Image (cartoon, rainbow, N blue to C red):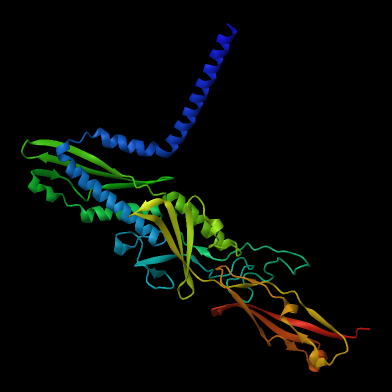
Amino acid sequence: MHKKKRGQVTVYIILGIIILFSAILLFYLRGTTEKEIGVQELIIAQKIPREVRPITNYVTTNLDDATKKGLLLIGMQGGYIYESQGGPIPDPIEEGNDFIYYKDHKVFYNIHKQNNNLFNYYFYKPKYYPWYYYPYSHFPKSGEKGSFAGFFGISNLPPLNGSSPSIQFQLMEFITNYLKENINLTIFDEQGFEIDADINNINVSVIIGENDVIAFLEYSLGIKKKLTNTITNVSYFYTNPQIRLKKVYNFTDFIINKDTTDILFNINNSENNKDDINIEKIENAYNYDDIIIIRDNKSMLYAEPYTFQFARENRYPALRYIPITKLTFFGTQAIMEEEITESRINPKADDPDEDEIDFTYEPNLPYHVTQSDFDRGYINLIVYAREKDNEDYSDWQELKIEVIRESEY
Protein backbone atom coordinates (compact mmCIF):
# COMPACT_ATOMS: atom_id res chain seq x y z
CA MET A 1 0.00 0.00 0.00
CA HIS A 2 2.83 2.33 0.89
CA LYS A 3 4.58 1.57 -2.40
CA LYS A 4 1.36 2.26 -4.36
CA LYS A 5 0.93 5.70 -2.77
CA ARG A 6 4.57 6.52 -3.45
CA GLY A 7 4.09 5.50 -7.08
CA GLN A 8 1.06 7.76 -7.37
CA VAL A 9 3.01 10.68 -5.93
CA THR A 10 5.77 10.06 -8.50
CA VAL A 11 3.22 10.09 -11.33
CA TYR A 12 1.75 13.36 -10.04
CA ILE A 13 5.22 14.93 -9.88
CA ILE A 14 5.97 13.88 -13.46
CA LEU A 15 2.60 15.21 -14.62
CA GLY A 16 3.27 18.46 -12.78
CA ILE A 17 6.64 18.85 -14.50
CA ILE A 18 5.07 18.17 -17.91
CA ILE A 19 2.29 20.72 -17.28
CA LEU A 20 4.82 23.32 -16.08
CA PHE A 21 7.05 22.74 -19.08
CA SER A 22 4.06 22.95 -21.43
CA ALA A 23 2.95 26.22 -19.83
CA ILE A 24 6.43 27.72 -20.21
CA LEU A 25 6.61 26.57 -23.83
CA LEU A 26 3.12 27.95 -24.57
CA PHE A 27 4.03 31.29 -23.01
CA TYR A 28 7.22 31.46 -25.13
CA LEU A 29 5.45 30.49 -28.34
CA ARG A 30 2.67 32.96 -27.68
CA GLY A 31 5.16 35.77 -27.36
CA THR A 32 6.99 34.89 -30.58
CA THR A 33 4.37 33.51 -32.96
CA GLU A 34 0.96 34.80 -31.83
CA LYS A 35 0.78 37.40 -34.56
CA GLU A 36 1.95 34.98 -37.22
CA ILE A 37 -0.63 32.37 -36.18
CA GLY A 38 -3.37 35.01 -36.37
CA VAL A 39 -2.33 35.92 -39.92
CA GLN A 40 -2.19 32.26 -40.95
CA GLU A 41 -5.69 31.68 -39.59
CA LEU A 42 -7.00 34.54 -41.74
CA ILE A 43 -5.38 33.05 -44.83
CA ILE A 44 -6.65 29.51 -44.13
CA ALA A 45 -10.17 30.76 -43.39
CA GLN A 46 -10.47 32.08 -46.94
CA LYS A 47 -10.65 28.48 -48.30
CA ILE A 48 -9.15 29.31 -51.67
CA PRO A 49 -10.17 26.87 -54.45
CA ARG A 50 -7.34 25.17 -56.28
CA GLU A 51 -8.28 26.70 -59.64
CA VAL A 52 -7.71 30.27 -58.42
CA ARG A 53 -4.51 29.56 -56.52
CA PRO A 54 -2.28 30.66 -59.43
CA ILE A 55 -3.79 34.12 -58.96
CA THR A 56 -3.32 34.22 -55.18
CA ASN A 57 0.17 32.73 -55.56
CA TYR A 58 0.98 35.49 -58.03
CA VAL A 59 -0.03 38.18 -55.55
CA THR A 60 1.81 36.43 -52.70
CA THR A 61 4.95 36.11 -54.85
CA ASN A 62 4.90 39.84 -55.55
CA LEU A 63 4.41 40.54 -51.86
CA ASP A 64 7.34 38.27 -51.02
CA ASP A 65 9.55 39.90 -53.67
CA ALA A 66 8.66 43.37 -52.41
CA THR A 67 9.38 42.47 -48.79
CA LYS A 68 12.74 40.88 -49.54
CA LYS A 69 13.86 43.72 -51.80
CA GLY A 70 12.81 46.21 -49.14
CA LEU A 71 14.78 44.32 -46.49
CA LEU A 72 17.79 44.26 -48.81
CA LEU A 73 17.66 48.02 -49.39
CA ILE A 74 17.15 48.74 -45.69
CA GLY A 75 20.23 46.69 -44.86
CA MET A 76 22.50 47.90 -47.64
CA GLN A 77 21.73 51.60 -47.12
CA GLY A 78 21.94 52.06 -43.36
CA GLY A 79 18.23 51.70 -42.66
CA TYR A 80 16.88 53.91 -45.44
CA ILE A 81 14.93 53.42 -48.69
CA TYR A 82 15.02 56.42 -51.02
CA GLU A 83 12.22 58.01 -53.03
CA SER A 84 13.79 57.00 -56.35
CA GLN A 85 13.58 53.39 -55.15
CA GLY A 86 9.97 53.58 -54.05
CA GLY A 87 10.65 54.55 -50.45
CA PRO A 88 9.73 57.69 -48.49
CA ILE A 89 13.23 59.11 -47.81
CA PRO A 90 14.56 61.92 -50.06
CA ASP A 91 17.54 60.75 -52.07
CA PRO A 92 20.87 61.77 -50.53
CA ILE A 93 22.79 64.26 -52.65
CA GLU A 94 26.40 64.67 -51.59
CA GLU A 95 28.80 61.75 -51.30
CA GLY A 96 31.05 62.13 -48.29
CA ASN A 97 28.40 64.14 -46.47
CA ASP A 98 25.10 62.29 -46.93
CA PHE A 99 26.26 58.88 -48.14
CA ILE A 100 29.11 56.71 -49.38
CA TYR A 101 28.61 54.87 -52.65
CA TYR A 102 29.60 51.29 -51.91
CA LYS A 103 28.80 48.16 -53.94
CA ASP A 104 26.06 49.84 -56.00
CA HIS A 105 24.30 51.40 -53.00
CA LYS A 106 24.24 54.83 -51.40
CA VAL A 107 25.12 53.88 -47.85
CA PHE A 108 23.74 56.42 -45.39
CA TYR A 109 25.84 57.90 -42.59
CA ASN A 110 24.58 56.45 -39.30
CA ILE A 111 27.48 58.10 -37.42
CA HIS A 112 28.41 61.76 -37.91
CA LYS A 113 30.84 63.77 -35.85
CA GLN A 114 29.49 66.44 -33.49
CA ASN A 115 28.89 69.79 -35.19
CA ASN A 116 28.33 72.07 -32.21
CA ASN A 117 29.45 72.61 -28.63
CA LEU A 118 27.40 71.10 -25.80
CA PHE A 119 26.65 72.52 -22.35
CA ASN A 120 29.68 74.89 -22.51
CA TYR A 121 31.75 71.87 -21.53
CA TYR A 122 31.98 69.55 -24.55
CA PHE A 123 33.70 71.03 -27.60
CA TYR A 124 33.07 69.59 -31.03
CA LYS A 125 36.48 70.41 -32.49
CA PRO A 126 40.05 71.00 -31.23
CA LYS A 127 41.89 72.50 -29.47
CA TYR A 128 39.71 72.01 -26.41
CA TYR A 129 38.02 68.95 -27.91
CA PRO A 130 36.41 66.92 -26.44
CA TRP A 131 36.70 68.89 -23.19
CA TYR A 132 39.37 71.01 -21.62
CA TYR A 133 41.03 68.52 -19.25
CA TYR A 134 40.14 65.36 -21.23
CA PRO A 135 39.91 62.67 -19.92
CA TYR A 136 39.84 64.35 -16.50
CA SER A 137 37.17 66.63 -15.08
CA HIS A 138 39.80 68.97 -13.62
CA PHE A 139 43.56 69.41 -13.53
CA PRO A 140 44.67 65.78 -13.09
CA LYS A 141 46.20 64.46 -9.92
CA SER A 142 48.95 61.87 -9.97
CA GLY A 143 47.60 58.41 -10.89
CA GLU A 144 44.15 59.66 -11.83
CA LYS A 145 42.62 57.57 -14.64
CA GLY A 146 39.88 59.89 -15.83
CA SER A 147 36.72 59.07 -17.78
CA PHE A 148 36.49 58.23 -21.48
CA ALA A 149 32.73 58.57 -21.82
CA GLY A 150 31.35 61.59 -23.63
CA PHE A 151 29.96 62.85 -26.93
CA PHE A 152 32.05 61.55 -29.81
CA GLY A 153 29.47 61.46 -32.56
CA ILE A 154 25.80 61.63 -33.53
CA SER A 155 23.64 58.62 -34.41
CA ASN A 156 21.47 58.86 -37.53
CA LEU A 157 20.04 55.36 -37.19
CA PRO A 158 16.26 55.54 -37.81
CA PRO A 159 13.87 54.05 -35.23
CA LEU A 160 12.81 50.45 -35.81
CA ASN A 161 9.04 50.91 -35.41
CA GLY A 162 6.52 53.73 -35.57
CA SER A 163 5.89 56.58 -37.96
CA SER A 164 8.27 57.98 -40.57
CA PRO A 165 11.23 57.61 -40.83
CA SER A 166 11.08 54.28 -38.97
CA ILE A 167 12.21 51.14 -40.75
CA GLN A 168 8.74 49.65 -40.30
CA PHE A 169 7.12 52.66 -41.99
CA GLN A 170 9.64 52.64 -44.83
CA LEU A 171 9.06 48.95 -45.53
CA MET A 172 5.29 49.48 -45.65
CA GLU A 173 5.69 52.39 -48.07
CA PHE A 174 8.13 50.49 -50.28
CA ILE A 175 6.02 47.32 -50.40
CA THR A 176 2.88 49.33 -51.19
CA ASN A 177 4.56 51.21 -54.03
CA TYR A 178 6.19 48.05 -55.37
CA LEU A 179 2.88 46.16 -55.50
CA LYS A 180 1.08 49.05 -57.19
CA GLU A 181 3.78 49.15 -59.86
CA ASN A 182 4.21 45.42 -60.44
CA ILE A 183 0.89 43.64 -59.92
CA ASN A 184 -0.96 43.19 -63.21
CA LEU A 185 -3.95 40.88 -62.90
CA THR A 186 -4.94 41.28 -66.55
CA ILE A 187 -2.45 38.50 -67.37
CA PHE A 188 -5.11 36.07 -66.13
CA ASP A 189 -7.77 37.26 -68.59
CA GLU A 190 -6.65 34.78 -71.22
CA GLN A 191 -6.94 31.97 -68.66
CA GLY A 192 -10.68 32.55 -68.36
CA PHE A 193 -10.79 34.77 -65.27
CA GLU A 194 -12.42 38.10 -64.67
CA ILE A 195 -10.94 39.80 -61.63
CA ASP A 196 -12.52 42.72 -59.82
CA ALA A 197 -9.76 44.53 -57.91
CA ASP A 198 -8.46 48.03 -57.22
CA ILE A 199 -4.68 48.08 -56.83
CA ASN A 200 -4.92 51.59 -55.37
CA ASN A 201 -7.04 50.29 -52.53
CA ILE A 202 -4.53 48.13 -50.70
CA ASN A 203 -3.27 48.13 -47.14
CA VAL A 204 0.14 46.80 -46.13
CA SER A 205 1.21 46.05 -42.56
CA VAL A 206 4.68 45.03 -41.42
CA ILE A 207 5.41 43.25 -38.15
CA ILE A 208 9.08 43.07 -37.15
CA GLY A 209 9.49 40.10 -34.83
CA GLU A 210 12.51 38.91 -32.88
CA ASN A 211 13.41 36.27 -35.45
CA ASP A 212 11.39 37.14 -38.54
CA VAL A 213 9.46 39.76 -40.47
CA ILE A 214 5.78 39.46 -41.45
CA ALA A 215 4.34 41.48 -44.32
CA PHE A 216 0.54 41.34 -44.38
CA LEU A 217 -1.50 42.57 -47.34
CA GLU A 218 -5.19 43.42 -47.42
CA TYR A 219 -6.22 43.44 -51.09
CA SER A 220 -9.80 42.56 -52.03
CA LEU A 221 -10.10 40.38 -55.12
CA GLY A 222 -13.36 39.21 -56.66
CA ILE A 223 -12.24 36.34 -58.91
CA LYS A 224 -14.86 35.17 -61.41
CA LYS A 225 -14.33 31.98 -63.40
CA LYS A 226 -16.06 32.78 -66.71
CA LEU A 227 -16.69 29.15 -67.66
CA THR A 228 -18.56 28.25 -64.47
CA ASN A 229 -19.61 31.76 -63.45
CA THR A 230 -18.35 31.04 -59.92
CA ILE A 231 -16.91 33.86 -57.82
CA THR A 232 -14.20 33.56 -55.18
CA ASN A 233 -13.48 36.47 -52.83
CA VAL A 234 -9.97 36.76 -51.47
CA SER A 235 -8.72 39.60 -49.28
CA TYR A 236 -5.65 38.54 -47.29
CA PHE A 237 -2.07 37.66 -48.24
CA TYR A 238 1.14 37.42 -46.25
CA THR A 239 4.81 36.49 -46.40
CA ASN A 240 7.20 35.68 -43.59
CA PRO A 241 10.94 36.07 -44.39
CA GLN A 242 13.08 34.51 -41.66
CA ILE A 243 15.21 37.60 -41.19
CA ARG A 244 16.19 38.52 -37.61
CA LEU A 245 15.79 42.22 -38.36
CA LYS A 246 14.98 43.20 -34.77
CA LYS A 247 18.07 41.44 -33.40
CA VAL A 248 20.27 42.95 -36.10
CA TYR A 249 18.82 46.38 -35.43
CA ASN A 250 19.28 46.15 -31.65
CA PHE A 251 22.85 44.95 -32.17
CA THR A 252 23.54 47.86 -34.55
CA ASP A 253 21.94 50.38 -32.19
CA PHE A 254 24.12 49.14 -29.32
CA ILE A 255 27.28 49.30 -31.43
CA ILE A 256 26.53 52.83 -32.64
CA ASN A 257 25.72 54.01 -29.11
CA LYS A 258 29.01 52.60 -27.79
CA ASP A 259 30.99 54.08 -30.67
CA THR A 260 29.56 57.57 -30.14
CA THR A 261 29.86 57.66 -26.34
CA ASP A 262 33.01 55.68 -25.51
CA ILE A 263 36.15 56.83 -27.27
CA LEU A 264 38.02 53.67 -26.28
CA PHE A 265 35.42 51.39 -27.89
CA ASN A 266 36.90 49.41 -30.78
CA ILE A 267 34.10 48.68 -33.22
CA ASN A 268 36.24 46.13 -35.06
CA ASN A 269 37.03 44.02 -32.00
CA SER A 270 35.92 40.42 -32.55
CA GLU A 271 34.71 40.32 -28.94
CA ASN A 272 31.78 42.50 -30.05
CA ASN A 273 30.42 39.64 -32.17
CA LYS A 274 27.60 37.61 -30.63
CA ASP A 275 24.79 35.23 -31.56
CA ASP A 276 26.33 34.69 -35.02
CA ILE A 277 26.21 38.42 -35.75
CA ASN A 278 29.61 39.85 -36.65
CA ILE A 279 31.19 43.14 -37.69
CA GLU A 280 33.53 44.09 -40.51
CA LYS A 281 35.11 47.52 -41.00
CA ILE A 282 35.96 48.82 -44.47
CA GLU A 283 38.48 51.48 -43.56
CA ASN A 284 38.71 54.69 -45.59
CA ALA A 285 35.89 53.65 -47.93
CA TYR A 286 35.52 57.30 -48.92
CA ASN A 287 38.44 59.57 -48.10
CA TYR A 288 38.88 58.83 -44.38
CA ASP A 289 35.32 57.70 -43.66
CA ASP A 290 34.53 54.03 -43.01
CA ILE A 291 31.83 51.53 -43.92
CA ILE A 292 30.70 49.32 -41.02
CA ILE A 293 29.18 46.01 -42.12
CA ILE A 294 27.08 43.89 -39.76
CA ARG A 295 26.22 40.36 -40.92
CA ASP A 296 23.75 37.94 -39.39
CA ASN A 297 24.81 34.41 -40.25
CA LYS A 298 21.49 33.06 -38.98
CA SER A 299 19.45 35.13 -41.45
CA MET A 300 19.78 34.32 -45.12
CA LEU A 301 18.55 36.65 -47.86
CA TYR A 302 19.18 35.74 -51.49
CA ALA A 303 21.48 32.92 -50.31
CA GLU A 304 23.72 35.36 -48.37
CA PRO A 305 23.86 36.29 -44.67
CA TYR A 306 21.64 39.29 -44.03
CA THR A 307 23.73 42.46 -44.12
CA PHE A 308 23.14 45.80 -42.43
CA GLN A 309 25.79 48.37 -43.27
CA PHE A 310 26.26 52.06 -42.61
CA ALA A 311 28.77 54.84 -43.16
CA ARG A 312 30.80 56.31 -40.30
CA GLU A 313 32.28 59.78 -40.54
CA ASN A 314 35.87 60.24 -39.47
CA ARG A 315 36.24 62.09 -36.17
CA TYR A 316 39.07 63.96 -34.51
CA PRO A 317 41.61 62.24 -32.29
CA ALA A 318 41.65 63.46 -28.69
CA LEU A 319 44.91 64.40 -27.01
CA ARG A 320 44.93 63.60 -23.32
CA TYR A 321 45.65 66.62 -21.17
CA ILE A 322 49.38 67.02 -20.40
CA PRO A 323 49.82 68.39 -16.88
CA ILE A 324 53.50 69.35 -17.20
CA THR A 325 54.03 72.92 -16.00
CA LYS A 326 57.63 72.77 -14.86
CA LEU A 327 60.86 70.98 -15.80
CA THR A 328 63.89 71.13 -13.55
CA PHE A 329 67.36 70.40 -14.93
CA PHE A 330 70.08 69.29 -12.57
CA GLY A 331 73.81 69.17 -13.06
CA THR A 332 76.70 71.26 -14.16
CA GLN A 333 76.90 70.15 -17.81
CA ALA A 334 76.98 72.66 -20.60
CA ILE A 335 73.64 74.30 -21.20
CA MET A 336 73.48 72.99 -24.77
CA GLU A 337 73.33 69.42 -23.43
CA GLU A 338 70.07 70.06 -21.62
CA GLU A 339 67.08 68.96 -23.69
CA ILE A 340 63.36 68.28 -23.59
CA THR A 341 62.53 64.82 -24.95
CA GLU A 342 59.30 63.12 -25.94
CA SER A 343 59.69 60.70 -23.01
CA ARG A 344 59.55 63.66 -20.64
CA ILE A 345 56.33 64.94 -22.21
CA ASN A 346 54.89 61.40 -22.53
CA PRO A 347 51.87 62.31 -24.69
CA LYS A 348 48.84 60.01 -25.03
CA ALA A 349 45.84 60.29 -27.34
CA ASP A 350 42.75 58.33 -28.34
CA ASP A 351 40.90 58.09 -31.64
CA PRO A 352 37.16 57.25 -31.87
CA ASP A 353 37.70 55.60 -35.28
CA GLU A 354 40.61 53.39 -34.22
CA ASP A 355 43.02 55.35 -36.46
CA GLU A 356 46.74 55.35 -35.70
CA ILE A 357 48.07 58.53 -34.10
CA ASP A 358 51.41 60.29 -34.52
CA PHE A 359 52.78 63.01 -32.26
CA THR A 360 54.59 66.09 -33.54
CA TYR A 361 55.92 69.12 -31.75
CA GLU A 362 56.67 72.82 -32.21
CA PRO A 363 59.57 73.22 -31.74
CA ASN A 364 60.64 69.71 -32.71
CA LEU A 365 61.77 67.31 -30.01
CA PRO A 366 64.27 66.67 -28.69
CA TYR A 367 64.61 70.37 -28.02
CA HIS A 368 67.94 71.69 -26.75
CA VAL A 369 67.41 74.23 -24.00
CA THR A 370 69.28 77.48 -24.50
CA GLN A 371 70.61 80.04 -22.06
CA SER A 372 67.94 82.47 -23.24
CA ASP A 373 65.26 79.90 -22.29
CA PHE A 374 66.66 79.75 -18.77
CA ASP A 375 66.93 83.52 -18.67
CA ARG A 376 63.29 83.85 -19.77
CA GLY A 377 62.24 81.10 -17.38
CA TYR A 378 59.97 79.12 -19.67
CA ILE A 379 59.57 77.39 -23.05
CA ASN A 380 56.48 77.42 -25.28
CA LEU A 381 55.80 73.96 -26.70
CA ILE A 382 52.85 72.81 -28.82
CA VAL A 383 52.05 69.10 -28.81
CA TYR A 384 50.02 67.71 -31.75
CA ALA A 385 48.21 64.39 -31.95
CA ARG A 386 47.58 63.70 -35.64
CA GLU A 387 45.94 60.87 -37.49
CA LYS A 388 48.78 59.00 -39.15
CA ASP A 389 47.41 59.25 -42.70
CA ASN A 390 45.37 62.42 -42.30
CA GLU A 391 47.26 65.39 -40.91
CA ASP A 392 44.20 67.64 -41.22
CA TYR A 393 42.65 65.77 -38.30
CA SER A 394 44.60 66.66 -35.19
CA ASP A 395 44.22 67.79 -31.61
CA TRP A 396 46.78 69.87 -29.79
CA GLN A 397 47.79 71.49 -26.53
CA GLU A 398 49.91 74.56 -26.00
CA LEU A 399 52.29 74.13 -23.07
CA LYS A 400 54.10 76.89 -21.22
CA ILE A 401 56.77 74.92 -19.40
CA GLU A 402 58.75 76.59 -16.66
CA VAL A 403 62.44 75.62 -16.93
CA ILE A 404 64.65 75.71 -13.87
CA ARG A 405 68.34 74.95 -13.64
CA GLU A 406 69.64 73.73 -10.32
CA SER A 407 72.93 72.38 -9.11
CA GLU A 408 73.21 68.75 -8.11
CA TYR A 409 74.67 69.87 -4.79
Quarter-of-image position of residue 153? bottom right
Q: Is residue 146 visible?
A: yes
Please tell me which residue is depicted at 49% across the width and 53% down the height of the picture.
251
Front position in the image: 139 or 227: 227
Task: Please state if 342 lies on the left or on the right of 386 as rendered.
Answer: right
Please tell me which residue is depicted at 35% across the width and 57% down the height of the picture.
72
Residue 12 image offset from top left, x and y in percent: 53, 17
Q: Tell me: residue 293, above or below residue 172.
A: below
Task: Please state if 241 lies on the left or on the right of 185 as rendered.
Answer: right
Residue 327 image offset from top left, x and y in percent: 80, 81
Quarter-of-image position of residue 386? bottom right
Q: Is residue 162 visible?
A: no
| Residue occupying the far front of the picture | 3
Q: Tell me: residue 212, above or below residue 252.
A: above
Task: Please state if 320 lies on the left or on the right of 243 as rendered.
Answer: right
Q: Tell me: residue 355, above or below residue 195.
A: below
Which image quarter holds the N terminus?
top right
Please tell me which residue is depicted at 62% across the width and 65% down the height of the picture.
119
| Residue occupying the far top of the picture | 1
Residue 123 image offset from top left, x and y in percent: 61, 71
| Residue occupying the far left of the picture | 227
How many labels, in total?
Answer: 0
Front position in the image: 69 or 121: 69
Which image quarter holds the C terminus?
bottom right
Residue 60 image offset from top left, x and y in percent: 25, 46
